Image (tube, grey):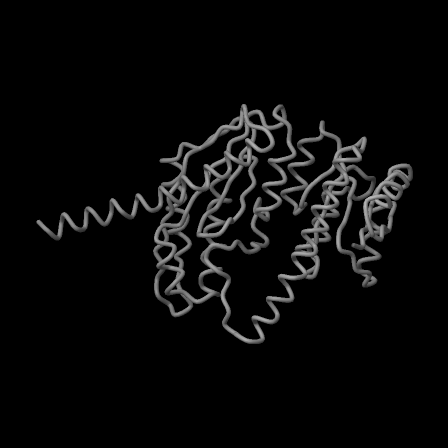
């Protein structure tokens, strides 16, 4: 795996060179500034992974993440931030900008090894997925992303990959998670919508709903991820939790104002259902992931229950 480490501290770069040299067959390159890193990318040099210090002069690591993600070919390249645990606000901003994970300094050998190995596995899996995708597209021009699989949503404030959201929750300590909440929303009758819509229309709908959620969560600090099955997972900070009834009404109003349509011109009526809000006061690491999974499943259950009740009302009115 070819890695570019960017840090203005030569001691950190030297330490990374020594440590990563013992981890596996990786090719580590270094840059002492964001400007140098961007020059190398602009010159066409390709990397499988980036390690970026958050606090650097002239251009910090968070802005560098944004610049890297602006390249079409680097939108999914893993980016690990180098930071200290006391810099949570910087970590939050880095994930919102597109970071995949982070490692803390001073470096723990086991932690850094684990993060690099995870990224190596991610790079390998994405190469397989890309090869499979090209093969599928060659054989089936209209191949679709399965309903249960997430896909990338770009240029929507606060929306990140699901794996990045899991990494964010996994690595933060109990103290750092204090006051955080997780919850989710699921599009109702998503199976029916998926079946009748083209791939383009379905993905446009998912992006539109993510924009509605993002707009409704402002000005709070938040992260959102599309997890597949028409479900969006959300994390909020600072002790704020939504009043779900008010929030749902607000979101449906925003969606209506978007006046969504299929590419055929047919109006699209989209409604969502919220799951339970999970406070992370006493959750850390794996427990936070369990809370995320529970929020996810409760939203999908709520969507099914809302449609069941609607069907029951229709049946009773028809019978009457």
Q: Please name whichever residue, 262 or 310, is drawn nearer the observer in this view of the structure.
A: 310
Q: Is residue 1 above or below residue 275?
A: below
Identity of the residue drawn at 72% across and 29% down: 85
Identity of the residue drawn at 25% across and 44% down: 309
Left or right of residue 15: residue 243? left
The image quarter containing residue 285 is top right
Identity of the residue drawn at 19% across and 46% down: 313
Q: Please name whichever residue, 236 or 311, is drawn nearer the observer in this view of the structure.
A: 311
Identity of the residue drawn at 38% across and 47% down: 272
Instruction: Locate the N terminus by quadrant.
Output: bottom right
- Residue 214, position in %: x, y? 51, 44
- Residue 20, position in %: x, y? 83, 44
The image quarter containing residue 131 is bottom right
- Residue 260, position in %: x, y? 40, 58
Left or right of residue 88: residue 153? left
Count the marks. 0
- Residue 248, position in %: x, y? 38, 40
Q: Is residue 81 above or below residue 195?
A: above
Q: Please name whichever residue, 187 or 296, is drawn nearer the observer in this view of the structure.
A: 296
């Amino acid at each position: 795996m070819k890695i570019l480490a960017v840090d203005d501290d030569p001691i950190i770069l030297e330490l990374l060179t020594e440590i990563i040299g013992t981890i596996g067959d990786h090719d580590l390159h270094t840059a002492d500034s964001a400007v140098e890193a961007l020059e190398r990318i602009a010159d066409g040099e390709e990397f499988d992974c980036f390690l970026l210090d958050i606090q650097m002069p002239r251009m910090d690591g968070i802005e560098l993440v944004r610049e890297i993600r602006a390249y079409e070919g680097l939108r999914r390249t893993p980016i690990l931030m180098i930071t200290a645990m006391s810099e949570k606000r910087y970590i939050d901003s880095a994930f919102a900008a597109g970071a995949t994970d982070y490692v803390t300094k001073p470096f723990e050998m086991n932690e850094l090894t684990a993060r690099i190995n995870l990224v190596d596995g991610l790079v390998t899996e994405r190469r397989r997925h890309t090869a499979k995708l090209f093969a599928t597209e060659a054989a089936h021009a209209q191949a679709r992303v399965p309903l249960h699989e997430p896909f990338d949503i770009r240029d929507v404030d606060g929306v990140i990959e699901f794996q990045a959201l899991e990494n964010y929750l996994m690595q933060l300590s109990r103290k750092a998670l204090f006051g955080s909440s997780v919850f989710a929303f699921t599009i109702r009758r998503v199976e029916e919508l998926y079946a009748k819509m083209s791939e383009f229309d379905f993905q446009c709908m998912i992006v539109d709903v993510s924009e509605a959620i993002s707009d409704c969560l402002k000005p709070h600090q938040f992260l959102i991820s599309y997890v597949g099955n028409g479900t969006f997972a959300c994390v909020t900070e600072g002790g704020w939790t939504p009043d779900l009834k008010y929030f749902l009404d607000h979101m449906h109003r925003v969606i209506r104002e978007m006046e969504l349509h299929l590419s055929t011109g047919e109006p699209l009526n989209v409604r969502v259902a919220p799951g339970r809000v999970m406070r992370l006061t006493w959750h850390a690491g794996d427990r936070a992931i369990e809370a995320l999974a529970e929020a996810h499943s409760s939203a999908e259950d709520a969507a099914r229950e809302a449609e069941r009740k609607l069907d029951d009302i229709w049946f009773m009115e028809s019978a009457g």
